[in-house]
Image (tube, rainbow, N blue to C red):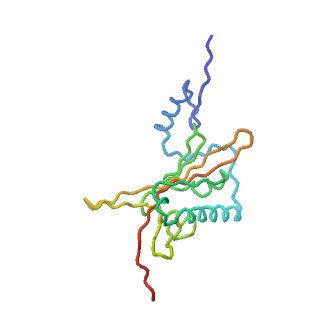
Amino acid sequence: MTTFNLYYCGFCSKAYIHKGSLKTYETTKHKNNKFLHNLYPLYISLFSDCQQFCSTFINLIQKRLTSHRSTQGLKSIEFPCSENIFAFYFWNEENFQYIHYQRKYNCIFKGLQGYQRIAKLFKFKEWGKRIDKTGTETYVVFDQVNLNNNTIKEKEAKFCWKERGKFLKYGIITFIFEINTKTIEIVDE
């Protein structure tokens, strides 16, 4: 007699023999779900935890925004973050989702609206911009203009949270984004 390990959908409890089949089912039937996998209610995050999360994010982004040519392109930052804090900040966002079979959360921000939404979440208007003494502005890219046909392509930045550790469980947040630089003229008054 053959026994199978069954993989269950975390949203409707449908069973599959193969993990790949479960993955296909969840991505087609439960796209952009907002289900949190915890059966216990998330506790309200402490103000100090929220402050630390915001300041860590802003400091890490600002450190990456240097004018050196090697800083341009697709980048990512990682730092420890509790599942609670991640869910607290991103739960109500339009592109928030939980991927059950990976035990991972995603939240994607696109275009100028995405930039402004992140600024509002972190209460820092210029979070993705830095101008150095030489007049070089380094910034997180959210819009890219195509000069050939005058169209604007919306770029995206993505927050991911994933559980790590085999024995001692902890969470890591990853922020994936693109950086570009341009020279601006500094006007002395």
Image check: 47 left or right of 186? Answer: right
Q: Nearer the viewer, residue 22 or 42?
A: 22
- Residue 122: % across, % down: 58, 65
Q: Is residue 3 left or right of residue 70?
A: right
- Which residue is the extreme one toward the left? 149
Which quadrant of the rendered structure holds the C terminus? bottom left
Tag count in the figure?
Answer: 0
Identified at 51% across, 36% down, the residue is: 26
Residue ranking furthest to the top: 1
Where does the N terminus fall, quadrant-wise? top right
- The percent position of residue 84, horizontal first and vertical second, equals 66, 53
- Give the answer, above or below, for where 112 lies relative to 20: below
Give residue 141's position: percent from left, percent from top.
44, 61
Q: Is residue 100 above or below residue 74?
A: above
Decide if residue 169 is on the left or right side of residue 17. Answer: right
Looking at the image, the residue that sits furthest to the bottom is 189
Decide: is 135 above or below 17: below
Side (left or right) of 38 relative to 19:
right
Q: Residue at x 53, y 67 (%)?
A: 127
Q: Position of residue 23 (x, y in %)?
A: 51, 34
